[in-house]
Amino acid sequence: MNDDDRVFKALADPTRRFLLDLLFARDGRTLTELESELEMTRFGVAKHLKVLEEAELVVARRSGREKLHFLNPVPIRLIHDRWIDKYTERHVTALVDLKNALEDET
Amino acid sequence: MNDDDRVFKALADPTRRFLLDLLFARDGRTLTELESELEMTRFGVAKHLKVLEEAELVVARRSGREKLHFLNPVPIRLIHDRWIDKYTERHVTALVDLKNALEDET
DNA sequence: AAGTTAGGTGACCAAAAGGTCACATGTCAA
DNA sequence: TTGACATGTGACCTTTTGGTCACCTAACTT
């Protein structure tokens, strides 16, 4: 399994995406803290975090008996750059911004 | 299955990512043309293209008995925007550009 | 019209992924 | 040092996914 595989497989699961959402909102949380936000046993959450770490979407730092988790945006940016070149980026960002603006009006 | 799910599950498979790479390099290809680039039966490729279409990562247009496939970058950009805000984007693009520059030197 | 070409469908099987549990290690606090 | 707390591991089972095949429809060609 190469780096790509790890990143995309990690993102394929809704629970793992929700974990990234939680860390995007606030970094540096422990396993137990994250577990409390989910309808799942600690073991399940730990397994998901391991997958995210192996994909380097999450980096973790030990502090005593706790382990703090942080979101790493680099792999996300690399996905973007794989299929959106600098020229296309201008168009697609404009399109997305327009879409968001229209949705805000309703 | 919601839109997110469809996009991320679609991206989870290496064959489907390779199909996106092919369409990124050159748009408007038929199933048969794409199949010739892969070590897989037509049925397998057709199944993968269906998944990509349902995720709207690929849009297709019929022309007679042929079906032309095009890459749609919008869902990719939305992934980016989900976990990279405007502020972080400046840092992470700088980091990625630096990394690419360093790799080019070797 | 007949043959060929492009594509679509549903059944089927093997492999992989998601979740839980029993059990284990290391760390803090009284 | 004893007990509680935070996390890690490997086995196990169920569900999902990837790929092939037999069979089908629609469109171009001569």
Image: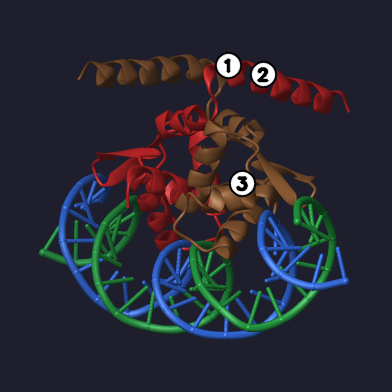
Chain colours: A brown, B red, C green, D blue
Is there a contact, CB below 8 Å, between mark 2 and mark 1? Answer: yes
Q: CA distance from mark 2 to mark 1?
A: 7 Å
Q: Which residue is mark 2?
A: B91
Q: Quadrant of the N terminus of chain A?
A: bottom right
Asked if badge 3 and badge 1 are on a common chain, one would say no
Q: Secondary structure at mark 1?
A: helix
Q: Which numbered dot is residue A7?
A: 3
Pinpoint the chain carrying mark 3.
Answer: A
In the image, what residue occupies the spot 62% across and 42% down?
A29
Kindly tell me whether residue A13 is visible in this rendering. Answer: no
Q: Position of residue A80 (x, y in %)?
A: 55, 30
Q: CA distance from mark 3 to mark 1?
A: 23 Å
Asked if badge 2 and badge 1 are on a common chain, one would say yes
Q: Label 2 crowding class (10 Å Cα cut-off): few <14, some 14-19, many 20+?
A: few
Asked which quadrant contains residue B98, the reply is: top right
Q: Nearer the viewer, mark 3 or mark 1?
A: 1
Q: Secondary structure at mark 2?
A: helix
Q: Position of residue A14 (x, y in %)?
A: 45, 50
Kindly tell me whether residue B103 is visible in this rendering. Answer: yes
Q: Position of residue C16 (x, y in %)?
A: 58, 66
Pinpoint the chain carrying mark 2.
Answer: B
Name the amino acid type tagged 1: Tyr
Q: Which numbered dot is residue B87?
A: 1
Asked if badge 3 and badge 2 are on a common chain, one would say no
Q: Is residue D19 above or below residue A78?
A: below
Q: Is residue B41 above or below residue B81?
A: below
Asked which quadrant contains residue A81, the reply is: top right
Q: Nearer the viewer, residue B9 or B83?
A: B83
